[in-house]
Image: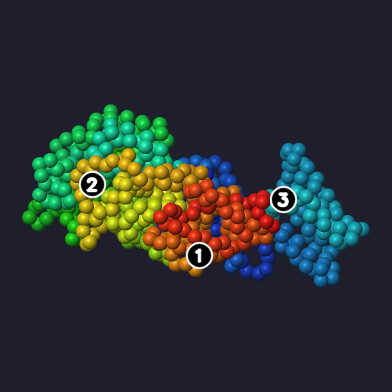
Amino acid sequence: MINPIAIQDVRPRTPEGFPAKAVTGEWVRVSADIFRDGHDLLFARVIWRPTGAGDWRSSPLSPLPNHRWEGTIVGEDIGHHEYVVQAWTDTFATWRRDTLVKHAAGQDVGVELEEGALLVSSAAAKLEGSAAAKQKKALCREAADSLRNKDLPVETRLAAVEVDGLLEVLKAYPVRRDLSSSAMMPLWVDRPRALFSSWYELFPRSNGGFEGTTKRLAALSDMGFDVVYLPPIHPIGITDRKGKNNTTSPDADDVGSPWAIGSKEGGHKAIDPSLGTFEDFAALVEEAGSLGMEISLDYALQCSPDHPWVTEHPEWFHHRPDGTIKFAENPPKKYQDIYPINFWPAKDEDRAALWSACWDILEFWIARGIRFFRVDNPHTKPLPFWAWIIREVQTKHPDVLFLAEAFTHPKMMARLAEVGFSQSYTYFTWRVGKQELLEYAVEVAQGPAADYMRPNFWPNTPDILSGPLRNGGPAVFRLRLLLAATMSPSYGIYSGYELYENQPARDTDEEYLNSEKYEVRERDYDAPGTLVPFIARLNAIRREHPALQQLHNIVVHPNWNPNILAFSKASDDGTDVVLTVANLDTAGRQETTLNLDLTALGVDSSRGFTVRDELTGATYDWWGASPYVRLEPADQPAHVFSVIQGVQGVAD
């Protein structure tokens, strides 16, 4: 039977019924199209709970234009949740509206007043038990008696339902006529770091192995990073090992690529001996935890020709007609030192054994304190595999998170997020112009995929030295960092960024010259003039401002200058508002007059207000929606303003 009330386009959701995503404590916006025939008013709400457990919690939905309704829910526990949107005819509100209109038109409302008394009495009948319930019941009876009292003027009888507290009682105990419900909607709730995190990638072998990396953690903590990502730490193969700058003719002392995993020392459950021992690794994880950080490991499902799996399980690999195993390629790139895994062996039992072995790798490192995995090239592995393994891992370890290194086409990127990945790399790296930056920021924050895909903005990676960073100066590095850190609640940089490393290997690709992927890279992190103080201040601002820790709240503020972009973010409760104004011209001064959406900033348009630049501490008194700004890239690429509301001393 068709519901009398239509409930359509419920969000958040995924295209094929996988859970949408949230984090604990996050205000999750729930919305739907809700309408019915006729003119009766509707009431709508959302109910939710941990899946199959506990009492339902309830929150009302509010009407928006074009029959859209919206409200919020909050997941307080990590794990599976479910929610349902419900709507019914709001009998009392409809009665109240119609009766007031009829009376105002001079019509007799005697019958309507009796109808109102019956509605109030119906609510009273549902109140039993406590002293508070008895008090509410008495309130209902008094209102019903007044509605029926013909000795009173009609205006007085109608005013009886406006008594303080009565309308709340009538909303709490409604007559739910035509009750309709949406389908049950799934929601997965992660720990907060799935949404808000600051990443730093480093190669342990360039930092003195695990022992040296452990010593470096304090500096990374001082800069404000909370996730330290390590490329593969496993033994590296000898066969077809790559030399410096990806050559196929290595010298005897070349260390090879960490992604060529496996040698006689072991595979994915082993540690490269040059980095240290398992005890050293445990000390690294423990030190990170003591500093409020965590270590993320690379989960790269591929093997060097020397990996034990190659001889123990040849059926897990792709074979050419001549019987040789096929190495990895992304034409024209060739990875002779890597064998991709065949996730669909001919025999079902071989597939089951392979998938189980991949699951065992995660279990092995989870047991050693890892709760965040950066997954290498997930788009080259089967989606059913990811849907299975992420579900299996999170069923046992709900706090484990997965970052997809998915530099692939948009639909595959979104699909990986849908089947379970907690975060995803994005196209931010290649967004440079004002329009494309703002459009992309809004897309990832508020587009359909935002219900389940969380972006992680990286200005650079070991594979990607792109766009303005190539041969760019410090102003470029400051700008790209600031945009990543303020546009997205999660962002990351690859080590060397703070030293302005910017030399490309060639004009034809995005590789670094003397890439750390193939050699040990020594750096002087104590050199003068680095980006370290700027990074530390920016990360401190992110921690201090809840508005920057959320995804869906971006608002674009237009202006006439194509080199200046402006956007704001506000916390759910509206108490924290941050306005970022950035100069995209890193070579010259730019100025403009902003066109601010004062409502989005929580500012009373009839009063002045003050903004404080969190980068410099300077304050500015503004009046109205069109303040003037000027930015000198050599000194400051942007303002990151906190908006101070109701400020004293600003002229009224």
Residue at 23 percent of width and 46 percent of height: 516
Q: Residues within 10 Å of mark 2 (few under 14, many from 20)?
A: many
Name the foreground residue: 369 vs 86: 369
User: In this figure, which residue is indicated by the disc labeled 2?
Assistant: 516
Q: Residues within 10 Å of mark 3 (few under 14, many from 20)?
A: few
Residue 155 picture location, percent across and down: 85, 61
Q: Is residue 446 above or below residue 108?
A: above
Q: Quadrant of residue 99?
A: bottom right
Q: Which quadrant is the N terminus positioned in?
A: bottom right
Marks 2 and 3 sit apart, C-alpha to C-alpha, by: 65 Å
Q: Nearer the viewer, mark 1 or mark 2?
A: 1
Q: Residues within 10 Å of mark 1 (few under 14, many from 20)?
A: some
Per the image, label 1 sits on a secondary structure element best described as strand
Q: Earlier in the sequence, mark 2 or mark 3?
A: 3
Answer whether labels 3 and 1 touch (C-beta < 8 Å): no
User: In this figure, which residue is indicated by the disc labeled 3?
Assistant: 168
Residue at 17 percent of width and 44 percent of height: 256
Name the foreground residue: 560 vs 127: 560
Q: Nearer the viewer, mark 2 or mark 3?
A: 2
Residue at 22 percent of width and 61 percent of height: 507
Residue 208 picture location, percent across and down: 25, 35
Mark 1: amino acid? Thr
User: In this figure, which residue is indicated by the disc labeled 1?
Assistant: 592
So how many labels did they put on this image?
A: 3
Marks 3 and 1 sit apart, C-alpha to C-alpha, by: 49 Å
Q: Earlier in the sequence, mark 1 or mark 2?
A: 2
Mark 2: amino acid? Glu
Residue 225 picture location, percent across and down: 40, 42
